[in-house]
Amino acid sequence: MTVELWLAFLVAASILVAIPGPTVMLVVGYAIGEGRRSAWATVAGVALGDFTAMTLSMLGLGALLAASATLFTLLKWIGAAYLVYLGIRLWRAPAVLAVAADGPRKRMSSMLAHAFLVTALNPKSLAFFVAFLPQFMQPAAPLLPQMLVLESTFLALAILNASLYAGLAVRLRGVVRKPAVLKAMNRAGGAILVGAGLATVALKRG
């Protein structure tokens, strides 16, 4: 993997991990309801979930690369359309938190497991990685080194992002609960996803 390709992935992944999807809403919801004690558990769950989803997705991509370069190229086109689809869905999503802010306090292990399941076992997460990662992989290069670089980079960004969202939600508990704020987060994230999909198509045409 070239430095230029890694920098492009770093920029794109930094933007995409910040998009308020189900995982972010889960982290924010626990931070509002449980306070700072939820941060370690949810961040660990997100990291484990992303690692699992990315590994499964990239192993599938490796098999696809070995089978057919044409299929791999087709997947990249489908991936661009999928990013646009996710953006539209997020734009129209209801302004609600994934976890109620009020209620009995949860165990750390329960919060970790919940964050892991939401992140790793959501079929949309697997499909998203399959759609996103091919843009930064080189079919002719060995798969394992690319997996190590992309996964370690994404995991570092995911951990930092989840930690920042949790800390910010704790500080701004009253503000983050407001539907107008959640709706604005959804629409900003949706617009970024649509833009990423369109940019991918434009790049391929060039």
Image: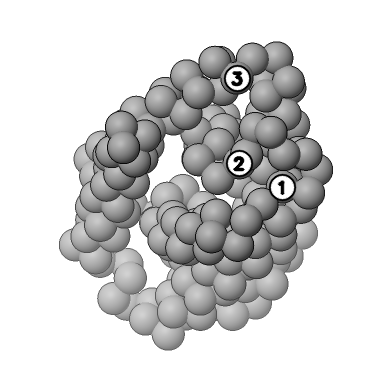
Q: Marks 1/2: CA distance?
A: 7 Å
Amino acid type, residue under disc 2 in the picture: Met
Residue 167: image location, x then y, percent: 51, 80
Looking at this view, is 27 or 71 the one in front?
71
Q: Which mark is residue 26?
A: none
Whether tag 1 and tag 2 are in contact, CB under 8 A, the answer is yes
Looking at this view, is 1 or 75 the one in front?
1
Q: Marks 2/3: CA distance?
A: 12 Å
How many tags in the picture?
3
Q: How would you rate the neighbour count of disc 2 (Cα within 10 Å): few for under 14, some for 14-19, many for 20 or more?
A: many
The secondary element bearing badge 1 is classed as helix
Residue 79: image location, x then y, percent: 44, 30
| Side of 3 relative to 113 (left or right) | left
| First along the sequence among labels 1 and 3 | 3
Colouring: one colour
Q: Which mark is residue 69?
A: 3
Q: Which residue is mark 1?
A: 146
Is any part of residue 143 visible from this angle?
A: yes
Residue 19: image location, x then y, percent: 39, 56
**Residue 162 found in image quarter:** bottom right
The secondary element bearing badge 3 is classed as helix
Amino acid type, residue under disc 1 in the picture: Gln
Amino acid type, residue under disc 3 in the picture: Ala
**Residue 109 found in image quarter:** bottom right
Q: How would you rate the neighbour count of disc 1 (Cα within 10 Å): few for under 14, some for 14-19, many for 20 or more?
A: some
Q: Which residue is mark 2?
A: 137
Q: Please, which residue is most extreme toward the left here?
A: 180
Looking at this view, is 72 or 174 the one in front?
72
Q: Split into 4 quadrants, where in the image is the C terminus?
A: top left
